[in-house]
Image (cartoon, rainbow, N blue to C red):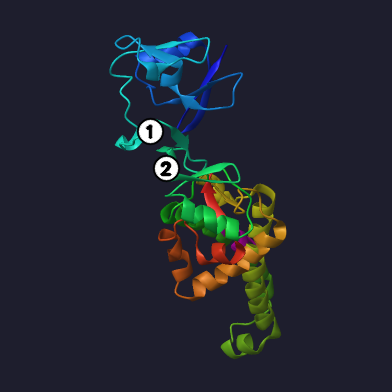
């Protein structure tokens, strides 16, 4: 029979009985660690499958499984995770943050266990029509700034690779007379092309990469991606709308970007407008 254990980082396994016992001896897991075997989906504390070498007759250490694990005195101390004293040993795992809490400190919604810390963000996603999500690790302000900086450099290089040949060909036939340069129709045309490229290139760049890969090259380099509230990929249309929504974040003195540093889900204003999230892969 194989076994699985769960901690804040998620599910681990499978382990044989001996491997799981070694984790106990190494103090990698303890009596409160949630485990299950390959035949069950119900996560229970390890102590329910174990006996101790100091209290072999303790009725609380009853064994319902055919296999038992040995716990020493230090490992079997009945203290809940986060040092929270409770009247019950029953622990529930929050489906959002994966931490364990006593039953009286969580709520159940659509078969999902939600702790008090995750409840506000969870309710917000439900209001936005999102599905029930698993753990999403939201990206903070500075890592997003780094990704945006990388994308800005890439876009700047692409734009000038297009503009330099245009300027060279456009101004090649113009004399050095300032009055002639100012009145020449090619000058106005080149300026218009420059503005057009400055608008369309970021839109094409952002729409393609977010719609296809859920991340621009800058975000890929920083290990980030843009997702819908339920953790799924966003559409090309939403990616395009998000690009133009960033204008709003920028024109109000970049306050829309700064909002990401204070929002519980690290959302900038354009994330709120388009109902998107930037998360770590």
Q: Is residue 17 above or below residue 77?
A: above
Q: Residues within 10 Å of mark 1 (few under 14, many from 20)?
A: few
As helix, strand or loop, the secondary structure at mark 1 comes to: loop
The N terminus - image quarter: top right
Which residue position holds label 2?
104
- Residue 60 disc label: none
Sequence order check: which comes first, mark 2 or mark 1?
Answer: 1
Q: Does 268 appear in magenta? A: no
Q: Is residue 41 above or below residue 26?
A: below
- Residue 88 disc label: 1
**Residue for point 69% across, 50% down:** 212
Tell me residue 129's x, y (percent).
64, 58
Q: Give the number of callouts.
A: 2
Tell me residue 2's x, y (percent).
56, 14
- Foreground residue among 150 and 228: 228
**Residue for point 48% across, 57% down:** 149
- Foreground residue among 77 and 22: 77
Tell me residue 247's x, y (percent).
56, 71
Q: Is residue 176 above or below residue 266?
A: below
Q: Is residue 257 visible?
A: yes
- Foreground residue among 69 and 87: 87
Most common secondary structure along the magenta stretch: helix
Q: Answer yes or no: do the residues labelled 2 and 1 have beta carbons within 8 Å?
A: yes
Q: Is residue 150 visible?
A: no
**Residue for point 47% across, 76% down:** 252
- Foreground residue among 99 and 108: 108
Tell me residue 142's x, y (percent).
41, 54
Q: Which residues are magenta?
A: 157-162
The C terminus - image quarter: top right
As helix, strand or loop, the secondary structure at mark 2 comes to: helix
Q: CA distance from mark 2 to mark 1?
A: 9 Å
């Amino acid at each position: 029979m194989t076994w699985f254990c769960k901690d804040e980082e998620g599910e681990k396994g499978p382990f044989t009985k001996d491997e799981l016992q070694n984790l106990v001896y190494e103090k990698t897991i303890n009596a409160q660690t949630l485990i299950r075997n390959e035949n069950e989906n119900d996560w229970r504390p390890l102590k329910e499958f174990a006996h101790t070498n100091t209290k072999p007759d303790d009725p609380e250490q009853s064994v319902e499984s055919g296999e038992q694990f040995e716990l020493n005195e230090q490992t079997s101390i009945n203290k809940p995770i986060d040092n929270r004293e409770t009247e019950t040993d029953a622990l529930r795992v929050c489906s959002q943050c994966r931490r364990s809490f006593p039953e009286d400190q969580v709520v159940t919604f659509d078969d999902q266990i939600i702790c008090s810390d995750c409840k506000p963000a969870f309710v917000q996603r439900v209001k936005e029509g999102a599905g029930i999500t698993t753990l999403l690790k939201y990206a903070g302000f500075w890592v997003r700034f780094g990704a945006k900086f990388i994308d800005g450099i890439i876009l700047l290089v692409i734009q000038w690779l297009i503009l330099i040949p245009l300027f060279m060909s456009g101004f090649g036939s113009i004399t050095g007379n300032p009055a002639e340069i100012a009145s020449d129709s090619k000058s106005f045309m080149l300026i218009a092309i420059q503005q057009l490229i400055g608008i369309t290139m970021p839109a094409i760049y952002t729409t393609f990469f977010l719609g296809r890969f859920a991340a621009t090259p800058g975000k890929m380099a920083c290990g980030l991606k843009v997702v819908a509230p339920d953790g799924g990929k966003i559409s090309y249309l939403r990616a395009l709308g998000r690009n133009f929504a960033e204008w709003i974040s920028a024109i109000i003195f970049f306050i829309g970007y700064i909002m990401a540093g204070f929002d519980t889900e690290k959302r900038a204003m354009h994330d709120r407008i388009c109902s998107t999230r930037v998360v770590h892969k």
